[in-house]
């Protein structure tokens, strides 16, 4: 049925989420904006969220720097003969 509808099935672990790439953005947002806060109303919270997003966009890292960091982490993992997400061999 999937082939007939031109759909490719992608198996994921039961604990995985389709939204994982975006979920990484919510941790800092929750930590720096909403945790331990006592906003008097939704307008105050909305202003605080908008201020954080403006700061985040101004201070975003350059894509070349992010790519270099990923390459360095991959190099270090390969030196250790360890693949990402797998436990180390005894």
Image (tube, rainbow, N blue to C red):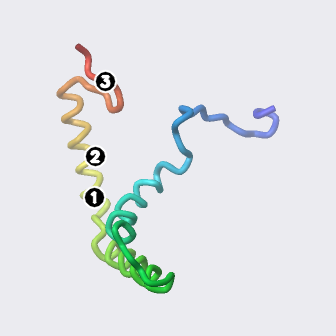
Residue 73 in the image: state x and y as whole percent: 23, 41
Q: Residue at x 53, y 51 (%)?
A: 19
Q: Residue at x 26, y 25 (%)?
A: 82
Q: Secondary structure at mark 2?
A: helix
In this figure, which residue is indicated by the disc labeled 2? Answer: 70
In this figure, which residue is indicated by the disc labeled 3? Answer: 87
Residue 59 in the image: state x and y as whole percent: 28, 72
Q: Residues within 10 Å of mark 2 (few under 14, many from 20)?
A: few
CA–CA distance between discs 3 and 2? Answer: 20 Å
Q: Residues within 10 Å of mark 1 (few under 14, many from 20)?
A: few
Q: Earlier in the sequence, mark 3 or mark 2?
A: 2
In the rendering, which numbered label is found on residue 64?
A: 1
Please indicate whether residue 14 sits to the left or right of residue 68 in the image.
Answer: right
Q: Residue at x 38, y 76 (%)?
A: 38
* Number of residue marks: 3
Say which quarter of the image contains residue 85.
Answer: top left
Q: Earlier in the sequence, mark 2 or mark 1?
A: 1
Residue 7 in the image: state x and y as whole percent: 72, 39
Q: With respect to residue 20, does 59 lie above or below? A: below
| 2 vs 1, front mark | 2
| 3 vs 1, front mark | 3
CA–CA distance between discs 3 and 1? Answer: 30 Å
Say which quarter of the image contains residue 40.
Answer: bottom left
The quadrant in which the C terminus is found is top left
Considering depth in this image, is 12 or 26 the residue closer to the camera? Answer: 26
């Amino acid at each position: 049925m999937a082939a007939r509808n031109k759909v490719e099935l992608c198996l994921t672990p039961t604990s995985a989420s389709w939204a994982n790439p975006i979920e990484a953005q919510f941790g800092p947002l929750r930590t720096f904006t909403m945790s331990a806060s006592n906003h008097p109303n939704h307008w105050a919270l909305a202003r605080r969220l908008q201020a954080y997003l403006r700061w985040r966009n101004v201070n975003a890292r350059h894509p070349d720097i992010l790519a270099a960091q990923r390459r360095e982490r991959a190099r270090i993992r390969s030196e250790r003969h360890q693949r990402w997400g797998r436990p180390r061999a005894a």
